């Protein structure tokens, strides 16, 4: 038998082993997230595996490139040890990434992406501690070892089965004849498709209205490599910047943002500048502002919005005293996006998800401290953790904040998490001390940021609250959320004793939600659903106890400034939610973290989700809270109109950021 045929069987067998390894990883991902498959029909899951096989073959083709090239040369038998080692090393690495992705998807409901690099860039000690204390590391290592054992055994077994006889013939001509079709098949595998156009792309995985089915169709190594190749590139950003005529896009955005009481102040380099005049006679001006940013505070699990688990009794009680926005959304899915959206009134944009760490983040914004007046308002920012994380101090000091109290400024805390810092109870206790020390003759802005409700969910023992049970894998997370709620309630009991309380507007807002089993749209809507609660004298009397207009974190600054009772000039990318006309349902533009290209526009009870700048999306009618769900809306005209507004908003905001036109 010619030697080339034995070599061909060896190479093709190695490709099959790798393809089977990826299929096993996909099956494990499905089994680990089986609660997400309940609404998905079996044919859709099977299609996910078929599409996923095509993505897998791209990675298999990359790994097998060297063995296939070596096949061209006679004497491959002498290279079998090298080729086997090559496949075992790269295959083992692929299996490790696949096992890591099981936990990654559990936390973020996303395949491996640029978030991996974002964490790598941060403090390695903190990231390592978070993983070690919050994840079953040893169990995952054991699983990786078992899978790698089977991989190595399969490769050795294949080598034995395909060993050519000592006297096997060979020739350059025959080897070349075999090599050409193999190379052609390899090229097709690397493209993932037979079509004449572009190769298989990220968007080709989106075949279903169910988010998990689409994610299952991807390959984590493919998404990670794509994210790595996209680092520093501006291709996706350029697509957004050229999506519409800039003047038409700007006109659309002005219609979206300008509202009753706005006096346009059109000026070069200030695309959305306007002076806002709050409605007279509605509420009274507040002297001070306290913004409380609650870590991972999901509206989906608040009792006041329908959850019966008793997770948020203190927030529920406070909600009876203020104005609760029940259709409010985070602009992103990570803390840094929630912070710059809430305090700087700028949205989370494709390619700028880590804005506080990017050069463009050094620009001035129409943020809360800038609009209140640096030097006029006393300011203090309290945080359980390290302000170096996400460049929080660098970003907000550049925006006008002057005083920061972080984890290293707490003396003798009651409890300190080895990963992040002091407990929420310690942070709130220190906040009470700092508020009491402020000069009573000057107004103040205080920002309080919690952290205990974050992986690894390390909270004080013995717990001051009962543990949450009955939510399965979310029990630990929701216990930490209940603890954060307890600390919040304890803070307000004491805050009401402060002399400044009657003159202070308290703003309670989540930085983002977290992953839940109900993935109701292409974009994981419930992960963005957070509460906004405004507390202050006279608010309920003027605005009612509940407001159902749609809003997002970029609306916080103009809403707060509107309640201060005086006109203000700004370039916020949101609006005063308490100054909308009755027929205005409100809107929110949202985007996940990392290199996930999905964006969405929410208007009233409708959501338009768009996979990428150049791709069409889906229109949904959605429901929140206890009846959470969504149905596709077939209205194509409405879908096109919402897509045009979504694209115009992102394009105009991105152009303002790139051109340094975000401030005053």
Image (cartoon, rainbow, N blue to C red):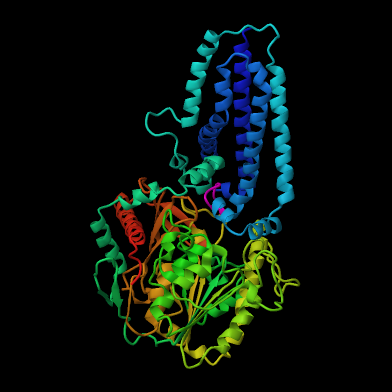
In which image quadrant can residue 307 be found?
bottom right
In front of the other: 567 or 617: 567
Q: Residue at x 57, y 8 (%)?
A: 171
Q: Which secondary structure type mostly characterizes the magenta part of the structure?
A: loop
Up-down: is 101 above or below 289? above
Q: Was residue 586 drawn as part of the magenta stretch in this picture?
A: no
Up-down: is 466 above or below 642? below
Q: Quadrant of the C terminus?
A: bottom left
Q: Quadrant of the N terminus?
A: top right
In front of the other: 395 or 655: 395
Up-down: is 145 above or below 423? above
In which image quadrant can residue 59 be found?
top right
Q: Position of residue 141 (x, y in %)?
A: 72, 45
In front of the other: 245 or 37: 245
Is 344 positioned to the left or the right of 267 in the image? right
Whether residue 164 can be seen here = yes
> Which stretch appears magenta?
108-115
Q: Position of residue 441 (x, y in %)?
A: 47, 93
Q: Was residue 110 drawn as part of the magenta stretch in this picture?
A: yes
Q: Position of residue 264 (x, y in %)?
A: 25, 73
Q: Residue furthest right?
A: 462
């Amino acid at each position: 038998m010619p030697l080339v045929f034995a070599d061909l069987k060896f190479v093709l067998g190695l490709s099959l082993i790798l393809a089977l390894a990826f299929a096993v990883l996909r099956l494990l991902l499905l089994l680990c997230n089986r609660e997400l498959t309940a609404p998905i029909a079996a044919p859709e899951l099977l299609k996910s595996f078929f599409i996923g096989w095509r993505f897998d073959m791209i990675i298999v083709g990359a790994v097998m490139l060297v063995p296939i090239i070596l096949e061209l040369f006679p004497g491959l038998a002498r290279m079998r040890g090298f080729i086997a080692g090559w496949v075992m090393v790269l295959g083992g690495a692929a299996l490790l990434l696949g096992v890591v992705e099981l936990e990654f998807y559990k936390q973020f409901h996303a395949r491996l992406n640029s978030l991996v690099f974002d964490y790598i860039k941060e403090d390695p000690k903190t990231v390592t501690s978070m993983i070690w204390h919050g994840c079953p590391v040893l169990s995952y290592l054991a699983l990786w070892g078992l899978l790698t054992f089977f991989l190595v055994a399969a490769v050795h077994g294949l080598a034995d089965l395909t060993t050519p006889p000592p006297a096997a013939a060979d020739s350059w001509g025959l080897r070349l004849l075999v090599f050409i079709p193999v190379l052609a098949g390899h090229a097709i595998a690397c493209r993932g498709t037979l079509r004449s156009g572009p190769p298989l792309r990220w968007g080709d995985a989106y075949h279903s209205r169910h988010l998990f089915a689409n994610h299952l169709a991807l390959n984590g190594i493919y998404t990670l490599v794509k994210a790595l190749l996209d680092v520093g590139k501006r291709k996706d950003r350029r697509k957004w910047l050229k999506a519409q005529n800039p003047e038409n896009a700007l006109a659309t955005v002005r219609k979206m943002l300008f509202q009753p009481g706005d006096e346009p102040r059109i000026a070069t380099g200030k695309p959305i500048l306007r002076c806002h005049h709050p409605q007279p006679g509605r509420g009274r001006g507040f002297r001070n502002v306290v913004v409380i940013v609650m870590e991972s505070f999901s509206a989906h699990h608040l009792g006041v919005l329908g959850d019966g688990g008793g997770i948020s009794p203190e927030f529920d009680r406070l909600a009876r005293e203020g104005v609760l926005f029940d259709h409010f959304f985070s602009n992103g899915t990570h803390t840094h996006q929630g912070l710059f959206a809430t305090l700087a009134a700028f949205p989370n944009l494709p390619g700028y998800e880590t804005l506080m760490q990017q050069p463009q983040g050094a620009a001035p914004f129409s943020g809360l401290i800038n609009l209140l007046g640096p030097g006029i308002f006393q300011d203090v920012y309290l945080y359980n953790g390290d302000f170096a994380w996400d460049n929080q101090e660098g970003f907000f000091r550049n925006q006008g904040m002057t005083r920061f109290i972080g984890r290293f400024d707490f003396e003798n805390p009651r409890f300190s998490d080895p990963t992040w810092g002091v407990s929420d109870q310690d942070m709130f206790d220190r906040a009470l001390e700092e508020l009491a020390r402020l000069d009573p003759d000057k107004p103040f802005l205080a920002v309080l940021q919690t952290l205990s409700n974050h992986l690894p969910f390390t909270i004080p023992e013995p717990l001051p609250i009962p543990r949450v049970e009955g939510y399965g894998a979310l029990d630990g997370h929701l216990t930490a959320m209940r603890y954060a709620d307890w600390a919040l309630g304890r803070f307000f009991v004491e805050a009401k004793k402060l002399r400044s309380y009657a003159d202070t507007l308290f703003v309670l807002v989540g930085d983002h939600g977290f992953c839940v089993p109900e993935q109701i749209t292409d974009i994981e809507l419930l992960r963005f659903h957070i509460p906004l609660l405004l507390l202050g004298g006279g608010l309920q009397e003027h605005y009612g106890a509940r407001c159902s207009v749609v809003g997002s974190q970029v609306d916080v600054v103009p809403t707060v400034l509107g309640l201060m009772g005086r006109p203000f000039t700004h370039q916020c990318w949101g609006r005063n939610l308490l100054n909308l006309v009755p027929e205005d349902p409100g809107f929110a533009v949202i985007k996940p973290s990392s290199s996930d290209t999905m964006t969405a526009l929410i208007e009233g009870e409708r959501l338009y989700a768009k996979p990428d700048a150049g791709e069409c999306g889906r229109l949904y009618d959605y429901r929140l809270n206890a009846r959470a769900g969504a149905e596709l809306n077939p209205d194509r005209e409405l879908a096109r109109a919402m897509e045009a507004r979504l694209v115009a908003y992102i394009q105009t905001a991105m152009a303002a950021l790139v051109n340094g036109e975000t401030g005053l």
